[in-house]
Image (spheres, grey):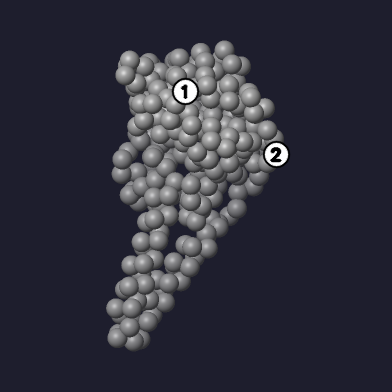
Amino acid sequence: MPTTAPAALPPAPHTWPWPPLLRGSAWLHAAAAGSTLWAPETGLWALGGLAANHALLTAAGLWPRSSVLGPNVTRLPAAAGPSVALTFDDGPDPHTTPAVLRWLDDAGVRATFFCIAERARTQATLLREIVAAGHSVQNHSLRHRHDFSLLGPKALERDIAAAQDLLGELTGVRPHCFRAPAGLRSPLLDPVLHRLGLHLVSWTRRGFDTRDHDPARVLARLARRLGAGDILLLHDGHARRGAAGRPVLLDVLPALLQRCRDAGLRPATLTEALPPRHAAA
């Protein structure tokens, strides 16, 4: 049966709550404009302040786990108890995802798949198998564009909303979480997510399994200080392959599941562990 999102939706705030950094940035721009207008000799100082401000905003967008540009879920809420979230990005992949599903089924655990919507369209049967097995499907953008963080607000909303519609149509369940491609974003993203009622979800730690061909190193990154509330990031799409041509993920996953069992941690989906952000406005 499809995994359904929690039924109770808290009311959506009427306006987007400005993060302190962005509120301060807006005031800085206004002050710089006023200063330059009334005292042109201060223009260079104003320009320097704006340059520093934009450098800070850029750095925040390049830090995937940052929350200064808006809410960013990096851990499960305390109410989730002794749980961790196994999350898989960039699928569904016809070669890797079925093997991941078999491992998860054998272990009796559920996971969350952040799917690229256009890829999901081409793998609709596999996507439905993910949902039928009790796993959660969430939004990882329409096409996983490399310039995603550079898009304007209208382009961001078109991309994310189209992915919402497509994933909802294919699975019967609209996502309530979004993960930015490569975790990169701009100050323009959170207002869009706010309007669409989506959490931005990053991770507690990642395995870098799209780059590293050594399963031991990937496992070590994920299992270091493993504890309740962790959100762990792996990839069933774009998976790095080892010397034998086997996706590294498939050698990491059984050992990671065993580490979770040894630590008394129960893998939970984001649908189970994370309430909706709010009703879409």
Compare marks 2 and 1 and give the one earlier in the sequence. 2
- The picture quadrant where one finds residue 264 is top right
- The picture quadrant where one finds residue 280 is top right
Q: Image height check: is 63 above or below 82?
A: below
The image position of residue 166, as x and y in percent, is 43, 29
Q: Nearer the viewer, residue 26 or 234?
A: 234
Type of amino acid under label 2: Ala
Q: Nearer the viewer, residue 111 or 151?
A: 111
**Residue drawn 39% across the image and 66% down it:** 53
The quadrant of the rendering that contains the N terminus is top right
Residue matched to label 2:
79
Dot 1 falls on a residue whose secondary structure is helix
**Residue drawn 49% across the image and 63% down it:** 21
Residue matched to label 1:
252
Dot 2 falls on a residue whose secondary structure is helix
The image position of residue 18, as x and y in percent, is 52, 60
- Characterize the local packing of mark 1: few (<14), some (14-19) or many (20 or more) Cα atoms within 10 angstroms: many
